[in-house]
Amino acid sequence: MVRLEPDELRPAEALERFIASLAGDGAVVSFVGLARATDDSGKAVTGLFLDCYPGMTEASLDAIAADAHARFQISAVAIVHRSGAVAPGAPIVFAAAAAPHRRAAFEAADYLMDRLKTDAAFWKREDKAGGAAWVEPRQSDRADRARWSD
Amino acid sequence: MVRLEPDELRPAEALERFIASLAGDGAVVSFVGLARATDDSGKAVTGLFLDCYPGMTEASLDAIAADAHARFQISAVAIVHRSGAVAPGAPIVFAAAAAPHRRAAFEAADYLMDRLKTDAAFWKREDKAGGAAWVEPRQSDRADRARWSD
Amino acid sequence: MKILFFGRLGETIGREIHVDLPAEGCTIAELRARLAEAHGALAADTVRACIDREIVPETALVLPGHEVAFVPPLSGG
Amino acid sequence: MKILFFGRLGETIGREIHVDLPAEGCTIAELRARLAEAHGALAADTVRACIDREIVPETALVLPGHEVAFVPPLSGG
């Protein structure tokens, strides 16, 4: 269940659908990321634009989901990611993992997000009063990603 | 947002309500626990009964939520927990944490679950073909709980 | 006075029983010993007593107006 | 041949431009050098080239029918 969503992302619906798809797992961990209303320096962000490369972006999400499956004792993964214009406060990403045991589900969801924050094929523009700025992963995102290096 | 739910627990609604209650947080981590269809020895469970002590049980959930607030840089916590008869596969617990940064939200949700699994004031009975059995926390739950000892 | 039971105890003893309490009260230990005569399960030291919905030690004094309960070990959620 | 651009490059250069490719193809490095004459941003070594939606090295051979794109560093999700 990996999907690029050009329109509104509804986390509750995504969670509902994910749970309905499961067969006997006891633990579901999900992450919802909402667009921040400020940038890293505290400046107001009036909107976010997520540029994607059709085909390549989906493939990057699929690869992250497959890596999580290979790495953890999980039975299902979901990634639903916005593309296009996202308003401040609106959901950008829903990522979830299901497993028989909660530890694996927590670790896999954590891993999904660390990977998505650095390796998902998006180009993000923050629109602000002073103009727009294209952003790169934070140093903290790179450090989080490095936690999972083999 | 801490609630004991004697009737059906709807995780998607709980998530929706939790997200709607937030003001500016970027990260929401939620856990959904579903009743297992088998016990630890693999035997089929036909139903689960969660006995609670009105007043004491809610207080135990409130205390766990307060401890999470004190321990992590989070801005909101939700716990919705079933009581009474729960069918196999049905949701038992929804626990969520929201924070400006995802690491705190993940850790707080993880913490909430480890605490709930050992310190929530419930008495759980598994109904099986051979009869019913009241259960205590697993050794693995106690070990998970011990991760957070001061 | 009403005494409440939960979990396995609620099933074997019933959700509540009524007992007469001395006007000057008694300790949990004394109350437990009395109740255990009829309900042996209450003698187990894994069974804890609550006064007004808080777990209390055996030395705690039960007074008229208190809500007293006996509970098995928590199962957790 | 159509060349695609994403992120900041898509904004400054446009989503796509058309160029003539020699029938025998050329390397990414050669293509990049040609395009960079008009679009200096493509000279930056943080800009990576893709063939058929996969990031490729500078030595990769571009042939007719390939989908070629240049992309800035990923922002992540």
Image (cartoon, coloured by chain):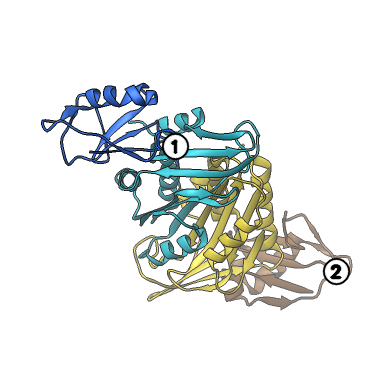
Chain colours: A yellow, B cyan, C blue, D brown
Where the C terminus of chain A falls, by quadrant? top right
Residue B121, by quadrant, is top left
Numbered label attached to residue B90: none
Q: CA distance from mark 1 to mark 2?
A: 78 Å
Q: Is residue C22 left or right of residue A22?
A: left
Badge 2 element? loop
Residue D76 in view of the camera: no
Question: Which residue is at the front of the view, C52 or C37?
Answer: C37
> Which residue was labeled with disc 1?
C11
Task: Residue at 60%, 36% (x, y): give it.
Answer: B39
Residue A57's image quarter? bottom right
User: Which residue matches tag 2?
Assistant: D64
The subunit carrying tag 2 is: D
- A134 left or right, relative to A77: left
Residue type, numbered disc 1: Glu
Badge 1 density bin: few <14, some 14–19, many ≥20, Cα 10 Å: few
- Chain for disc number 1: C
- In this rendering, the answer to whether A62 lies above or below A91 is above
> A82 and A130: which one is in front?
A82
Residue extending furthest toward the left: C24
Q: Position of residue B8 (x, y in %)?
A: 50, 58
**Image point 50% across, 34% down: which residue?**
B134
Say few, some or many: other residues with alpha carbon within 10 Å of mark 2 (under 14 / 14 to 19 / 20 or more): some
